[in-house]
Image: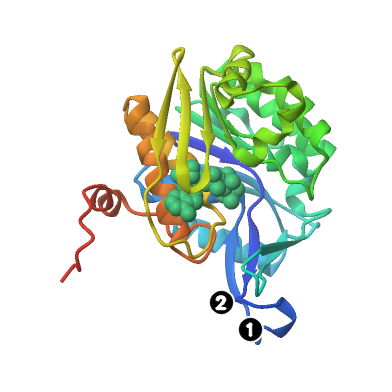
Amino acid sequence: MSEVVTAGEAMVLLLPPRQGYLRHQPYLEVRVGGAEANTAVALARLGFSVSFLTFLGQDELGELVLNRLRAEGIQVFSKRTRAPTGLYLRECLPSGRGRVFYYRQGSAASFMHPESFSPELLNEAKLFHLSGVTPALSESTRSFTRWILQEARKRNVVVSFDVNYRKKLWVPEEARVFVEDILPLIDILFLSEEDAVLWSEEGFEREEELLGALSAKGPREVVLKRGKRGALGFSNGSFLESRGFPVKEVDPVGAGDAFNAGYLAGFLWGHPLEERLKLGNALGALAVTNLGDYEGAPSREDLFGFLAEDLSLDR
Ligand code: ATP
C-alpha cells in the first residue's frame, strides 16, 4: 500500500526533439505523459511510495506506459482493456508556440468507471491526487472521479485536485460547474492562471477574492500557479506569494504537474505554506528546463542541491 495514490490517463507521447512543424520532423521521441502520471513520477523520485490507478489497452503502447512508470518505482494498478492506450503528439511551431494533438478519444482510460478498483487501495494512503483532465475524458470518468473522491473522503485521505482545464476536452461552463460541485470533497485545490479564466464572469476583481471564494466551498488550501512569476497560496485564512525561480525555459509542458508534486511533498513532509510553495516553484522551474512531461523531476538530493543554489559542476 502506498502513501500517495493517484489515478488518471497515462499516454504515450511522441515528441519532436526540435522546433518546427510536425510534418517536417524526421523522427519523434517516444516518451510517456499525462497529468497525474507526471505528478506521480515526480513524487516517486522524491522518495514517496506512489500507486497509480489506470486503464491501459492490451497493446504495445500499454506495455510501454507500464514499463516506464514501473521503472520510476510507481506501483501501477491497471486494468487492460480492448480499447487502445491513449497517445498524444506535441509540436513546437517555428514561432515558439506549442500545439498538442490528442489521440485519446475512446481510449482505455476513458472507460474508467466507479468501482473500477478496490477502494481498499486507499486504506493506507495519506494523500489522493487527481486532476481535471480525468473527469474531462468521458461521462464514465466523470462518475469515476466523484466515486473515488468520495471513497478517499470516507477514509480521511487528504484529497488534492488540480483544475487543469483542457479546452480540447470540454467546454468552460461544463468544467466550472463540475469543479464547483466537487469542491466539498477537496482539501487542496490547485489552479493555473488559465484555469482561473473559468471564473472570469464571476466579477472577482482580485485573484485573492477568487481563491477565497473557492476555499469557502470546501478546500482548506487553494494554490494559484502563475507561470514563471511563481504562485499565490491561501491557507488558514491567509495569503502568501512565492516567487518563481529564474531558469531557462526549454519546454513549459508539465510545469504545473511538477509544481503540484513539490507542494504536496512539502505538505507530506509537514512544512509550512511558505516552504510548500517554494518546493512547488522549484519543481515547476526544474520541469521547464527539460524536454518532456516529467523528465526534469529531481531526486530529493538534487532538489535540495538546487534549493541550496549549488549549481556548480558535480565532479
Ligand atoms: P502546465 O503546462 O503543466 O499545465 P500550468 O499552466 O498548470 O502548467 P504554470 O503556472 O504554467 O502551470 O506553471 C506551474 C509552475 O511552474 C509555476 O507556478 C512556477 O512555479 C513554475 N514555472 C512555470 N514556468 C516557469 C518558468 N518559465 N520559469 C520558472 N518557473 C516556472
Q: Is residue 213 above or below residue 100?
A: above
The residue lying at 54 percent from left, 53 percent from top is 254
Quadrant in the picture for residue 28: bottom right
Label 2 beta carbon within 8 A of ligand 1: no
Q: Find out whether the residues at labels 1 and 2 contact each other: C-beta distance under 8 Å.
A: yes
Q: Nearer the viewer, residue 232 or 295?
A: 232
Mark 2: amino acid: Pro
Q: Residue at x 65, y 44 (%)?
A: 8
Query: Which mark is first along the chain, 2 or 1?
Result: 2
Q: CA distance from mark 1 to mark 2?
A: 8 Å
* 6 relative position to 241: left or right: right
Residue depicted at x 71% and y 77%: 22
Mark 1 lies on a secondary structure that is loop
For label 1, the residue is 27
Q: Residue furthest left?
A: 315
Quarter of the image containing the C terminus? Answer: bottom left
- Kind of residue sitting beneath label 1: Tyr
